[in-house]
Each structure stands twice: as C-alpha cells, then as structure tokens.
Amino acid sequence: MSAVSTNVIPIRWNDATNEIVWLDNSQIPWEERYISSREPERLIKAIQKLEIRGAPVLGEAGAYGAAMIVNNSLNSNEDILRNVVQKGDVLAASRPTAVNLSWGVRIIQSAVKKAIDDGKNPSEVKAVALDSAKKIQEDNIRATYQLGENGKELIHDGDVIITVCNAGTLACDGLGTATAPLRAAWADGVQFRVLATYTAPLYQGARLTAWELHKDNIPVQVITDNMAGHLMREEKATSVWAGADRILSSSSDESGTIYNKIGTFGLALMAHELGVKMYVAAPTSTIDPSSKVRDVKIEQRKASEVEALFGGTIVVPKGVGVLNPAFDRTPPEYVSAIITEIGTARAPYGESIPALLKNPRSMVKT
C-alpha cells in the first residue's frame, strides 16, 4: 500500500466512558470540535443536523449507536433484545437515503440475536455488540486503503479532477472513498489538481473536501456549483469523482444506479456530454442488493438551509417556497466505473456488481 495516512478521526468509541465521540462536521473549517454522548437521542440529533454525515461513517454511527443502546440496557437479555430492536429501528430510520446507517444497525441487531440464541449472558451480549461495532469501523478503514489502491491507476499526471460534496475522511473514515484514490495517487508522486464544487446549500465541498485536501497539500481550488460545466470544458477536466450513499443492485436494468449528494446527477450529465469520465467510489457496504428505484426515499431537508446562506443571511424573499432534496439519482449509463475495496465494476453493472457481492470479502452478504 502507498504511504498515505490521515490524522482525522470522524467517530470513535471511548472505552473509558462508554460514549461515542464524533467530530462535528457542521463546524469545519472554523473549529475542530469533538462531541461525546451516551444517549441515542443525541446521536440521532447529530445525524440529522449533519454533525455526523457520509454513508460509511453513518454505518459506523449506526453500529456504535446500536451497541450503545445495548450497553445502556438492563442486565437482562430480554431488555437488551427489546431495546436494540425498537430503539435501533428508530436510529436506522433517522436518515432515509443512505443505506449504510441501517446496515450498521442491522449488523449489531443480528449479532445480538445470535449471541442470545447461543446462550451468552447479558454482559457477554453487550461485549459482542461493541466488538461487532468496532469491527465495522476497522473494516471500513481497511476498505478505504484498498479502495485507494484499486482506484489510483485511474489518475494520471496532469489530470484535472472535479469532486462533489465530501467523500473524504470526514464522511467515510480512513482515506475516504472518492478521496482515497486521489490520496494514494498523490503519495505515489502523481501530479494533478482538484476543483472542488461548493455543493450548496451546506457547502460540504467548499468547507470539508477543500479542508481535507489542503491539509494533505493536494492542490485544490473551490468552484461554485454553477461553474462546473464551464470549467469542466475550459480547464479540460479529465474526470469527476463522487462517493455514493446508495448503489442499487437489485435488477439488471437498475444495477449501478447511484444515489449521492444533490448535484451529482448534473455533473454526470455534463461529464457524459463532454466525454469526461465519471467515477464513483464506495465500499461494498453502500451497495443495496434489495431495493429498486421506486423503493428509495430521497430525503427532503428543511427550507431554512436554502433560505439563508451558511452564515445566516436570508437570501430568499419572504413567502417564496423552497425545495431542498438532499440527494439525487444518477442512472448507470452515466457512470464510467464504480470502484470498491474489492475491485472495480463496469457496465454491464447487472453482471459486475453482483459478482463483487459474491466475493467473500464483500461487506454485504447476499
């Protein structure tokens, strides 16, 4: 592996206090503020307020949150099981579009049920839940390094790369997803530059991706979302890199459909028109082998995020309506490749993605 590393820790479990500790994404780049809690309700609030965000880190938050529910329960297997099912389901539903959140919760729920069925006592069941959550984080981090190695060959000297939102360490742990190949290529001496789109209305590209790449000394310039088409053409962009919050793989015609931060579909359309590669990077835990397009709910966030600039200045006239979908859907025909920790999938995705999921190293068992 390339000698790449990151010192950002987006979420972790504090063994001394039995709390979850997370880096508040809503305050970057102004302040690196860590928050800790042992209350599931506070964790849900953090997820909904985007203090914790990004599909893989949401998977870790779901797992740690479910483990926290288990550890907060009485020393009774009956109480543990009831809480991890009921309260875990509430946690899993706190953001609907990203599949990793519910995936992380379900893994802990399954581990708890198995431990109880195996005759373990309450203390042992609690240990199983926490160990399972820690393993999810370890697997996630390992996957980002493997993903970086798998994707770095797609980046070459002189490339101009456009990114959307933040699919870096803050969102994905480790080296990130869309940033992992960039970091791995940069560590190998490949010279390129990045144009990070603002990603309105909460500016995750400007605030978070630019912050991460700048810390890594990777050349990055911030552009507004409506500059992307012009600069993709005029700067001779070579590729667009995006993460994913959900990748469908339930039917041959919908496999490879990408749900990601709003604006991804527009970039994919422009890239397709201009002959620019559109790469999506995500761990196999983001692949959804069950849902179809009709099943996926696009999260609608509050109007105030659009009505005011990030600093609070109101820019929308009073009484004017607002639409604020958090994600969009990119059809598979606009995706050049999907890079995972196991390997790279290409069209036809109805064949290549199921093949990835059959790999014993896949994080999703079909």
Image: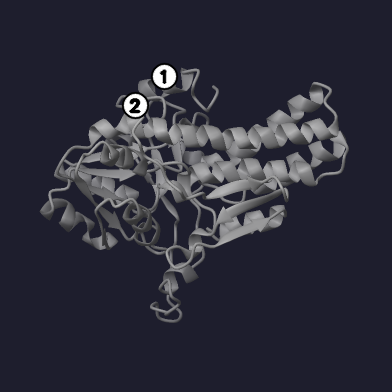
Label 2, label 1: how far apart the Cα atoms are: 9 Å
Of residues 154 and 81, the one drawn nearer to the viewer in this rendering: 154
Report how many numbered discs are placed on residues in the image: 2
Of residues 221 and 364, the one drawn nearer to the viewer in this rendering: 221
Is any part of residue 340 visible from this angle? no
Q: Tell me which label, 2 or 1, sits earlier in the chain.
A: 2
The secondary structure type at the circle numbered 1 is: helix
Please give the residue where the numbered disc 2 appears in the rendered image: 345
* Residue 235, position as x, y percentages in the image: 13, 53
Amino acid type of the residue that numbered disc 1 sits on in the rendered structure = Ala
Residue appearing at x 46%, y 18% in the figure: 359
**Image quadrant where residue 197 sits:** bottom left
Of residues 318 and 80, the one drawn nearer to the viewer in this rendering: 80
**Image quadrant where residue 190 sits:** top left
Pointer 2 and pointer 1: residues touching (CB < 8 Å)? yes
Q: Is residue 108 above or below residue 119?
A: below
